[in-house]
Amino acid sequence: MTDRIALKGRLLSFKDDPATAGAGALEHHEDGVVLVADGRIGAVGPAGSVDVGGAEVRTYPEGCLILPGLIDPHIHLPQTRVVASYGAQLLEWLQTYTFPEEGRFSDRRYAAAVACFFHDELLRNGTTSAVVFCSVHPESADALFAEAERRGMRMLGGKVMMDRGAPDWLLDTPGTGYAETTDLIRRWHGRGRLGYAIAPRFAITSTEAQLAATRALVQENPGCWLQTHLAENRAEVRLARELYPEAASYTDIYDRFGLLGPRSLFGHCIHLDDKEVERLAATGSVAVFCPTSNLFIGSGLFDLARLRAAGVRTALATDIGGGTSYSMLRTAAEAYKVLQLNGQNWPALDAFHAMTRGNAAALGLEDEIGTLAPGSAADMVVLDPNATPAMRHRMEAVKDGDLAQTLFVLMTMGDDRAVLETWVAGRCLHRRDDGQTIDP
Ligand code: GUN
Ligand code: ZN
């Protein structure tokens, strides 16, 4: 078998953010070729302009779109069986459904089995990279990284640190959380395509001593990311303020411990005052929009226009299992509706940028993932806008394959059924019509 493969068909990738750079942001070829060599993008361009000599050429049906793999920057591995838990808002949802399920991840075998399912499901949905919260148990982070490594995926993650506010059997301590995180970073961060995201769960489940230990971890490991939750739900904000009365705001709790910065990802960011928004912007911190979760747990409406106008970097994520779908397409559809409720429009090109290069840029990884630029990893997804009878019927009304309309149909009506293939580092690891994810 050759290690050079050429994918031929309609291509779309982003060189920049279309919201600010306009049409010049797009790399779009109706009849294009992406050449893959040794797991990376070798060349991209209109068919005929790319030398595919010696490569195996795969031609996709008219209408299909070849894109960079989708990126999910906020998802919980131990919540695959928490999805669709009825009738509670955040704090009650955590206590009633989430903590009991996360308790099962002390069992290495259980963690490994779920990690396998989790990666299958990401790939079935066209997601090739994610930033993952594991449970408090280091075993769960080992399971995540081992499975990601087996598939060659660019995955970031970390065990949550939590030393209060949950059942005793689910807590670490400032000392053990620090030691276990340090050990996981040493064993996994920078190994192959893996990266570590230090994960104090949120201010409510960490004491001051644990946030101080988190500061030390961040300072000692500047190549790692930080992930946590911020201002998701009003009762959560109230409780965080009660637990940290000296802080001027919820954001200020993290700020006082030096946890804001360009490698810091804050899930939700719904209930923020102007000063908090200013601090997120000034520090280059990332606000992660999780629309299916925010709707399902009844948390509130993310104000994308406000955050972007203030200069806050943003990302888009599923937040399984508060979120209800592994599909970034469905996530984009719900984001669109949340923004509609706030009188904001969100063009499909912006949504597809968010799911690919935008999320990569939020991680500082846009030179490695999220685009089809030469030199990037060959992580790709092939989407089929005619995946279902209803989509096919709708697509008949799209004139001349108009790109923006096609993308809007894909994000509004599409889900895992629209994912024809998913490629990781130049290998096809999911083919829809084979019915199952391909074991590497
Ligand atoms: N805040 C703290 N932990 C969690 C979690 O697991 N899910 C969500 N949605 N919010 C959180
Ligand atoms: Zn979350």
Image (cartoon, grey):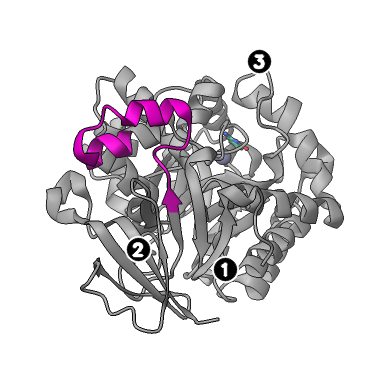
| Quadrant assignment for ligand 1 | top right
* Residue type (three-letter) at the residue carrying disc 3: Gly
- Asked if the residue at label 3 sits under 8 Å from ligand 1, the reply is no
* Residue type (three-letter) at the residue carrying disc 1: Leu
Question: Image quadrant of residue 278?
Answer: top left
Image position of 105 (left or right of 194)? right
Dot 2: within a 10 Å radius of its alpha carbon, few (fewer than 14), some, or many (20 or more) residues? many
Image position of 192 (left or right of 43)? right
For numbered disc 2, what is the local secondary structure?
A: strand
The residue to which callout 3 is attached is 87
Please report the residue visible at 34 percent of the width from the left and 55 percent of the height from the top: 357
Query: Quick one: 111 or 314, which is closer to the camera?
Result: 111
Marks 1 and 2, Cα distance to the nearest angstrom? 30 Å
Which callout, 1 or 3, points at the residue further toward the start of the chain? 3
Image coords of residue 60 (percent x, y): 40, 56
* Residue type (three-letter) at the residue carrying disc 2: Lys
Q: Which of label 1 and label 2 is nearer to you?
A: 2
The residue to which callout 2 is attached is 8
Question: Image quadrant of residue 264?
Answer: bottom left
Q: Which mark is residue 194?
A: 1
Dot 3: within a 10 Å radius of its alpha carbon, few (fewer than 14), some, or many (20 or more) residues? few
Magenta span: 382-408
